[in-house]
Structure formats: C-alpha cells, structure tokens
Amino acid sequence: MAHYEHVLRGDVDSFVAHLDSTIPAGSISASLEDRADQRIGDARMVVRMYERYSALGGNRVSLCISVLAVGDEMSVSAITAGGSQAVFWKLNTVGESTFLQRGVDAILSFPR
C-alpha cells in the first residue's frame, strides 16, 4: 500500500473533473470504477476509486482518492492497494507505486 496526502485550494468540482480526466488517460486499462459525494454543512467529501491492470504484477491495482473540501480549501488523500500475488506479505509493490505516482502527478498538475 502506498499513500500520499496534499492540501490545496480551488474549486472541488473542477479538481475532481481534472482527476477523472487525467488519471484514466495515463493507461489504456485505467478506469474510474466508482464515486461518492457527501455533504455535511459546509464540508464536502468526494471519493474516487480508479483501477488499472498492472502488467508487471499480472493483476489489478486500485487508487482511492478522497477529497475533504470546505470552501476552496481541500485536503486530499490518495491510497493504492493491490499489485501483489503473495498470500502473507507483499512481494511486488511496483504497480501500486506507479499508479500512486500517476495520481500524485494529476493532483499536482491541477491548475490553480
């Protein structure tokens, strides 16, 4: 499992639209698998789950990006999972790290 956190400012809808177009564009097998959008008062939580095939690991890898937004302030968490064929421990995490880097690149390329 690989993890990244970042804080930024901007419009959450524009940010999520940017993620939804940028992350799947990085791989022919990448796709947006599911989404959630919740509100409590002024706070909004947006979750996106992406998945892609990892040729190196021979399996699928998922990337979950959660955005907590209040006004134009956003706190983003990106976490990957999958990418290993071992039963009791992870032997190959390259697929996870590569997919996480795709998510990080998308987060950091958001035009502010």
Image (cartoon, rainbow, N blue to C red):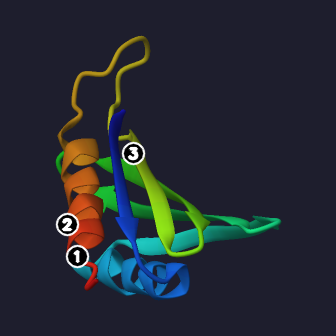
In the image, 72 versus 22, the foreground residue is 72
- Real-space CA distance between mark 2 and mark 1, rounded to the nearest whole angstrom: 10 Å
Q: Check disc 2 and report the residue beneath it.
A: 105
3 or 1: tag closer to the N-terminus: 1
2 or 3: tag closer to the N-terminus: 3
Which mark is drawn over residue 26? Answer: 1
In the image, 64 versus 67, the foreground residue is 67
Please, what secondary structure does the residue beneath circle 1 have? helix
Up the image or down, 41 lies above or below 57; here it is below
Q: Give the image location of residue 76, x and y in percent.
A: 44, 56
In the image, 15 versus 9, the foreground residue is 9
| Residue at 44% in and 74% down | 31
* Number of other residues with Cα within 10 Å of mark 2, as a class: few under 14, some 14 to 19, many 20 or more: some
Q: Give the image location of residue 13, x and y in percent.
A: 54, 85
- Real-space CA distance between mark 2 and mark 3, rounded to the nearest whole angstrom: 14 Å
Q: Label 3 near label 2: C-beta < 8 Å?
A: no
Quadrant for the N terminus in the image: top left
Q: Label 1 near label 2: C-beta < 8 Å?
A: yes
Q: Quadrant of residue 106?
A: bottom left
- The amino acid sitting under disc 2 is Asp
2 or 1: tag closer to the N-terminus: 1
> Looking at the image, can residue 57 be seen?
no
Please, what secondary structure does the residue beneath circle 2 have? helix
Quadrant for the C terminus in the image: bottom left
Q: Quadrant of residue 110?
A: bottom left
Q: Check disc 3 and report the residue beneath it.
A: 80
